[in-house]
Amino acid sequence: MFHWLEKNPFFFAVGVFLTIAFAGAVTILPNFAQSAQPIKGLKPYTVLQLAGRGVYIKDNCLSCHSQLIRPFKAETDRYGQYSLSGEYAYDRPFLWGSRRIGPDLHRVGNYRTPDWHANHMWEPTSVVPGSVMPAYKHQFTNIADVETAYAEAVTVKTAFNVPYGDDIKPGRAAFDAYYKAKVLPAALKIAKQMKNKDLIAQVQAGKIPEVVALVAYLDRLK
Amino acid sequence: MNSFIVKGLAFAVILMIATIVVVQKMHIDLSDPINWITILGALAIAGLSFGVSAKYLAQMQNDTASGELAEENWDGIGEYKNELPAGWAYSFLGVMIWGLWYFFLGYPLNAFSQIGQYNEEVNAYNAKFEAVHKNADAATLKDMGESIFLVQCAPCHGETGDGLSGKAEDFTKGRTKATVLNIIKNGQNALGAFPGGMPPGMASGAAAEKAAEYVASGCKGKAPAEFGVCAGCHGATGAGTPNVAPSLKGYDVKTALAKGKTGAIGMMPSFANRFTPVQEKALDSYVNSLKQ
């Protein structure tokens, strides 16, 4: 067999490739597979949080905020426990970011409250003097795109087996029922914590302002 | 001397001259010995390149092969019987021994781990920090507390600790009479650290007013008789009783950091495990020094 391989350089090259590829696969892939698993206790984003993630992406928060705490003392002192790869298992796409004009947000839910976010998104300098972050007042009137978030949940549930409940299923009727039963109450809870009468009134009228969804998402980052 | 050596020598000389020209053009500071070392290195490389290539090229032109031929030949190409070079053999043995060490001892023991390095660094730093500041004086603690406060607490409590007009507790005013009256009326278990918490309506009317005034003053002076109902749990001087009720003098920063707080103003998240004991002490002393 080896004599034959020596006479056929093409198949010899194929054999070399297969051998090295196999060695690479058995040494690299198990580690990949292990670190890509969701960490214990990680729950997928709720539909409201996904809508907030949409706002985060749309308003391009990640061009100034990272979501990745590196294992350095200076970072863990300020932002908390360093990030683990399994924490991003349900992030599609991940929002690590690469610049820190603002602080890291990967654990912002641990040390900021919805009330604080409400003040901060309306006028950042009211709570952080000297902040260079622009105000995001339009988020208080724009309505969050919950339908797309729901569609995203349905898609990742079907395509990647993300563990959502049985109430996430395709169809307009299913969405309407889910919106009333799950999304609105969660939004109302956040709006009440944000202590903004206008936001509460909007949610009670059945509309979720972008900032409520965004804060629901930020509050989930722990 | 054949033409090849002449050309090679000329090339090496050109390289050397080029080096010297570059050094002069770039105004390189020759008082720094590192620049001399670099220049000498460049000249040496030019000389050695010429020397080594000249040697091997001459060998290719002039050398003839000799020695005992091995019996086998491959398509008419034979091979001399050569001794195994000693340097190669020793290196090979050395690599084998190193490989055994690396497989069975070196790799599992000395494998680099980013998290391991982080843990070592943090533990070493914290131990040193605690040792240095074990007996820190009041001024140091207050300074340390202020710098931590500005990073971790100021976003909600304000840079001066004024609570940003009602968004969080105003440390500069301390507990006001109104706050204390509110607690007496509605009860309190904001810290969640004390079993049961404080039931609502422990006092009312003028009695509550008197007790509230005393608490808002920071429990200074002689306690009025109306404080008696509070003293049952908070102690005769309002200093608190372990596991029963918190101190009424100043703020219980340590418990608030560990447990977070939910009260009339809103919710403060827990900051458990974010600070070392000395840092907690520093924050405590700073926050309690803010009252004007």
Image: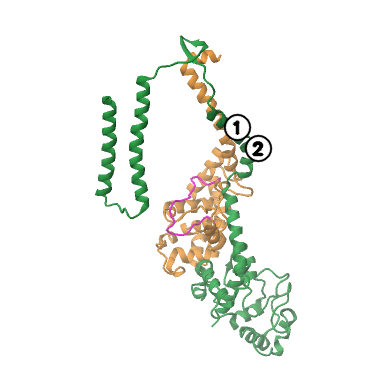
Colour chain B appears in = green
Residue underneath mark 1:
B96
Q: Which residues are magenta?
A: A89-107
The chain carrying label 1 is B
- Sequence order check: which comes first, mark 1 or mark 2? 1
* Residue ID at (52%, 53%): A70
Q: Secondary structure at mark 1?
A: helix
Q: Is residue A162 above or below residue A72?
A: above
The chain carrying label 2 is B
Task: Check disc 2 and give the amino acid type.
Answer: Phe
Quadrant in the picture for residue A30? top right
Q: Secondary structure at mark 2?
A: helix
Residue B104's tag is 2
Q: Is residue B3 above or below residue B16?
A: above
The residue lying toward the viewer, choosing from A2 and A138, is A2
Q: Disc 1 to disc 2, how far (Cα)?
A: 12 Å
